[in-house]
Amino acid sequence: MTETISVPMWLFYLASALVMWALLDRLLIPSTRWFLRRRINRVVDELNTRLQFQIPAFKLTKRRILIDRLTSDPKVMQAIELQAEHSEIPRQVLHAQVKRYAREIVPSFNAYAYFRLGNYFARRIAQLLYRIRLGYSDDAGFRKIGPNASVVFVMNHRSNMDYLIVAFMAASRTALSYAVGEWAKIWPLQTLIRSLGAYFVRRNSRNTLYRKVLARYVQMATQGGVVQAMYPEGRLSRDGRLQSLKLGLISYMVSAFDPKGDRDLVFVPVGISYDRVLEDRSLIRTLDPNASERSKGFVIATFLKLVGHNLSLMVRQRWYRFGYACVNFGTPVSMRSYASTRGIDFRVLGADARIEAIERLGDHLLEAIASMIPVLPVPLVATVFVRRPNRSMSGLEIKAEVQRLIDELEIRGAYVHIPRADRDYAITAGLRMLVLRHLVVESDGLYRSAPKETELLRYYANGIDHFLSEPH
């Protein structure tokens, strides 16, 4: 019993590693999880005392549990049965596909990451690049939203900065759960985005089973009271205009909505606009069928050049950020009231009638979003140069034209953001931005549009063209 037993060093290290893992698994990891969970719960309790729309229990449910609920949902199981009957794919294979789809879609919201980290960096980045302004907010309409309602912010999509700016502007009301495209499914970005409550969407997928899993998740989240934000256009505007809506997600939500149920469904139209969209040239380039694909090296070099140029302007104290970014929150659209006044229940409509009713709802929301898009200095001045191409104008002529344009827009009900409540300053700021970007050239006190920048000027003018093209 007292004999010495020798073992190989590799076996000793292996046994030590197993002991350490057992200690971590049984003692340290559970206690760490308990500590973090307790801290997160404190954050949630604190937030729910001051947020208008509280964080619901569904949003705080563990991701693994939500995945299990989604994969075992009766309607998803029924979709598996139907596909198995009409194909030669075994049910086990289809169920594995469903589980993979659920893992891809379902987020893992972390309140601490969203409000303590995400909101901080969103605010810092947004304010570093833009002068952020809240233009209009229908606070009376917001106060009418019931505490048990499911709220969905629907907005136009101008830039990838939309995610940061709208989340930052809405942070005093709630935490937003975004529907994001496949562009964000890269490591480690996807982990961060999931922790902020976003869920992934394959926007162009025609897979029936995938669409059913996505539909059920959206319906479960909506019925669970999760506050969501979405871009019904489906992608960034390429030409600056508001695009026709993709009604897939909206269709999922209203198709399961009970107008007599306990929880109302409320759409909040949101309009956002910029004096400068960071991706403007890339977006316009996609409209050119003859444009060659840019290499990653070119993209990186262009980005570094942009950063270097703006740092140089900062050093010389000639940097004005990228102008103004403005957000408007419109009058909430209650689906309970909408369905009641029209005598419809989307759940019981036939397929064709439901599509037609959803399209009418989409038109209603599109009109509401369009009316909320703010008018900023750069689009105002750009419109003048688009209307008078190749014409040289003095500063006084430009100001007179913009003054008339502002009057026309205000008569048509547009919200025109006038910095410092000074129209003269607003026009000067817009013109200065265009000159600094070489979209407008100045010579001997006269200004004209740069010959090769007509499309970019039109891009900004298009952002407010819907106010001017509609009959008064």
Image (cartoon, rainbow, N blue to C red):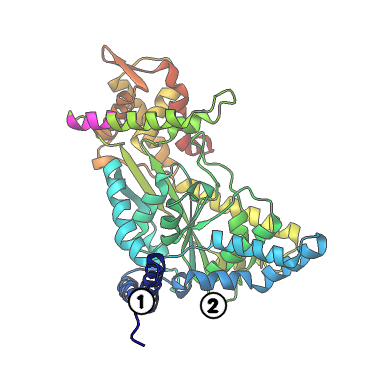
Task: Name the spot of residue 124 as percent of width and height, x first.
Answer: 27, 49
User: Tag 2's secondary structure?
Assistant: loop
In this view, the residue farthest toward the left is: 316
The residue nearer to you, when weighing 241 against 163, is 163
User: Tag 1's secondary structure?
Assistant: helix
Q: Residues within 10 Å of mark 2 (few under 14, many from 20)?
A: few
- Residue sitting at x 34%, y 57%: 118
Task: Name the spot of residue 349 as percent of width and height, x first.
Answer: 72, 65
- Residue sitting at x 39%, y 58%: 138
Where does the N terminus fall, quadrant-wise? bottom left
Residue range of the region highlighted in magenta in the rendering = 309-315
Q: CA distance from mark 1 to mark 2?
A: 48 Å
- Residue sitting at x 43%, y 65%: 109
The residue nearer to you, when weighing 365 against 308, is 308
Asked whether, in this view, residue 445 is left or right of residue 265, the answer is left
The residue nearer to you, when weighing 202 against 277, is 202
Give the residue at mark 2: 262
The residue nearer to you, when weighing 245 against 223, is 223
Give the residue at mark 1: 23
Task: Name the spot of residue 303 as percent of width and height, x first.
Answer: 37, 32
Query: Is 106 inside the magenta-drawn segment?
Result: no
Q: Is residue 466 visible?
A: yes
What is the number of callouts on the image? 2
Q: Is residue 403 visible?
A: no
In this view, the residue farthest toward the front is: 3
